Amino acid sequence: MCGKEQQVEERYSRQMLFAPIGEAGQQKLMDSAVCIVGMGALGTVLANHMVRAGVGRVRLVDRDYVERSNLQRQMLFDEDDVEQVYPKVVAAEKKLRRINSSVRLEAIVADVTALNIEELIDGMDLVLDGTDNFQTRFLLNDACFKRGIPFTYGGAVSSRGMSAIFVPGQTPCLRCFIKTGDSGGQTCDMIGVIAPVVDMVASYQAVEAMKYLVGDEKQRRNSLVTFDLWQNQYFEMKLGEPDNNCPCCQLKEYPALELNGDQAVLSLCGRETIQIAGSGALDLVLWRDRLEQAAVKVSLNPFLLKAELPEGERLVLFADGRVLVQGTDDFVRARSLYARYIGL
């Protein structure tokens, strides 16, 4: 046995002893590629499982940076990541490389939109949902079904969780069950969340991902699971047949991929933050010099620039052109501050 084979056997020995995986399944995992969209609570647990399981290629995509409020439930981050204001995918990649250096990790700091989603999932065997809003989930759902890529859905809020795996050509899609994505204000930023429910949801997603990747179709769960850990409730709803009028998996219209309306401005629910896409890449060093003339405080790292404004709000600039206006949920106010300090 050569050195590399011995290392593989040692690292994954307990996983390979599990009969449904074995040596053949482990090799399939090592030959697989997955994309995790969202590197927050769900995403960090998913990434931890995928990397420790030995999935060969793991792509991490997220638009945000690490904040102190993340540390209660986002398992790959620590206080140093907060102090350094690292983008979440960058902080996650650093930790994951120390966990398993044999996995090919790709950290992409980006906002997932209709313009880039198909490129982001290109070449992937599976997409895992680590997001916190239905706008992005519908985007993942539509893009995955258009491209024929399985999609594991997960949601966690308060003490409640939901999870399912949707496989194009074999199951209905997310739109067959959830029509509008209107959660009525039920988000983690509005009513909170406890960490154990996050771990449970992501573990349900991860194990279904592993079943799919090793090819154990007979054991793949064909239901949408919902539960409340605090209230000791559990419910399974069979996926059944697709909705004949579903615009995604039946009519092949993929509404989330349509480019219409003003998609350049987005409210990040419950966070008093407006995201403005901008019109092109930003030279962060140049913008540091400019904003130092007008802002109260400016801080820069290799990934983003933060500026505290005299008006009380904050600007966070990313190299890809995005700007977060923090401290307001008023679109008009956010556009005004953007125009004043960044320009149109």
Image (cartoon, rainbow, N blue to C red):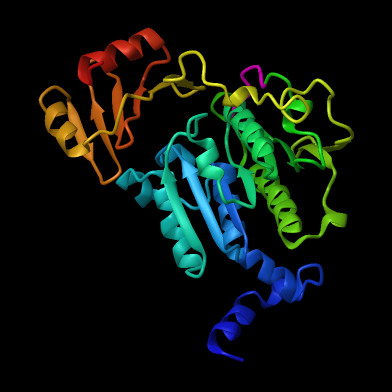
**Can residue 63 be seen by looking at this rendering?**
yes
Which residue is drawn at the image coordinates 59% and 44% (left, top)?
42
Q: Is the magenta stretch mostly helix, strand or loop?
A: loop
Tell me, yes or no, if residue 177 can be seen here. no
| Residue 28 appears left or right of 341 | right
Give how far across and how far down residue 326 sits, in percent: 36, 23
Residue 134 percent coordinates (x, y): 62, 27
What residue is shown at x 78% (from left), y 37% (from top)?
227
Residue farthest toward the top in the current orientation of the protein: 332
Q: How many marks?
A: 0
Q: Nearer the viewer, residue 58 or 82?
A: 58
The residue nearer to you, when weighing 276 against 295, is 276
Which quadrant does the C terminus fall into?
A: top left
Task: Give the magenta part as a residue range.
Answer: 181-187
x, y percent for residue 285 = 17, 39
Residue reaching furthest bottom?
1
Q: Is residue 304 left or right of residue 154?
A: left
Question: Height in image: 219 above or below 70?
Answer: below
User: Residue 284 falls in which quadrant of the image?
Assistant: top left
Q: In this view, does 145 lie to the left or right of 95?
A: right
